[in-house]
Amino acid sequence: MSKEPPNSEHNQQFKDGVIWANCVTLANENEVVLVTQDKAFYNERKYERGLAENLSKEAQSSPNPISICHELKQLLSGIRVDFGPDIERIGNPSAYV
């Protein structure tokens, strides 16, 4: 209703406000990454500028980080999991019990 992102002068997106409010709530417990191509969430409506200024300020007051990206591929490229064999468990079959 305040006409700040993700809303605007001519576009009040209640559902976007609800999405953002849930991001803030979730950040009380864990890191949050919002993946959206909705430019209303971005500073100057540009992906490369990150979160809109008012959202960024709100995110900074959260106990855990809130970040944004416009493609799932962008998020997944930053997640790396080493899932090679566990040599200690291979040599000790009782470790599986």
Image: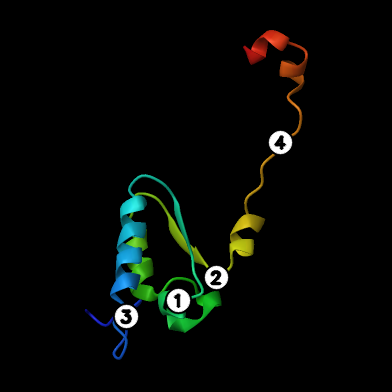
Instruction: Indicate the quadrant containing the N terminus: top left, top right, bottom left or bottom right.
Output: bottom left
**Residue 61 appears in view:** no
Q: Tell me if label 1 and label 3 are in contact, CB under 8 Å.
A: no
Q: Earlier in the sequence, mark 1 or mark 2?
A: 1
**Which amino acid does the dot numbered 4 rest on?**
Phe
Which residue is label 2 attached to? 70
Which residue is label 4 attached to? 83
Image vertical order of residue 18 relative to residue 94, above or below:
below
Which residue is label 3 attached to? 7
Q: Earlier in the sequence, mark 2 or mark 4?
A: 2
How would you rate the neighbour count of disc 1 (Cα within 10 Å): few for under 14, some for 14-19, many for 20 or more? many
Please give left or right for residue 48 compared with residue 12 in the image: right
Q: Of residues 61 and 4, which is closer to you in this image?
A: 4
Residue 60 image position (x, y, % from top left)? 36, 60
How would you rate the neighbour count of disc 2 (Cα within 10 Å): few for under 14, some for 14-19, many for 20 or more? some
Assign a secondary structure to mark 1: loop
Which residue is label 1 attached to? 42
User: Which tag is nearer the camera, tag 1 or tag 3?
Assistant: 3
Residue 16 image position (x, y, % from top left)? 35, 72
Q: Which residue is drawn at 63% across and 56% down?
A: 76
CA distance for labels 1 and 3: 11 Å
User: Which tag is nearer the camera, tag 1 or tag 4?
Assistant: 4
How would you rate the neighbour count of disc 4 (Cα within 10 Å): few for under 14, some for 14-19, many for 20 or more? few
**Which amino acid does the dot numbered 1 rest on?**
Tyr
Q: Which residue is drawn at 51% across and 81% down?
A: 46
Q: Tell me which corner region of the image, top left, top right, bottom left or bottom right, holds residue 85.
A: top right
Instruction: Indicate the quadrant containing the C terminus: top left, top right, bottom left or bottom right.
Output: top right
Residue at the far bottom: name it: 10
Q: Tell me if label 1 and label 2 are in contact, CB under 8 Å.
A: yes
CA distance for labels 2 and 3: 18 Å
**Which amino acid does the dot numbered 3 rest on?**
Asn
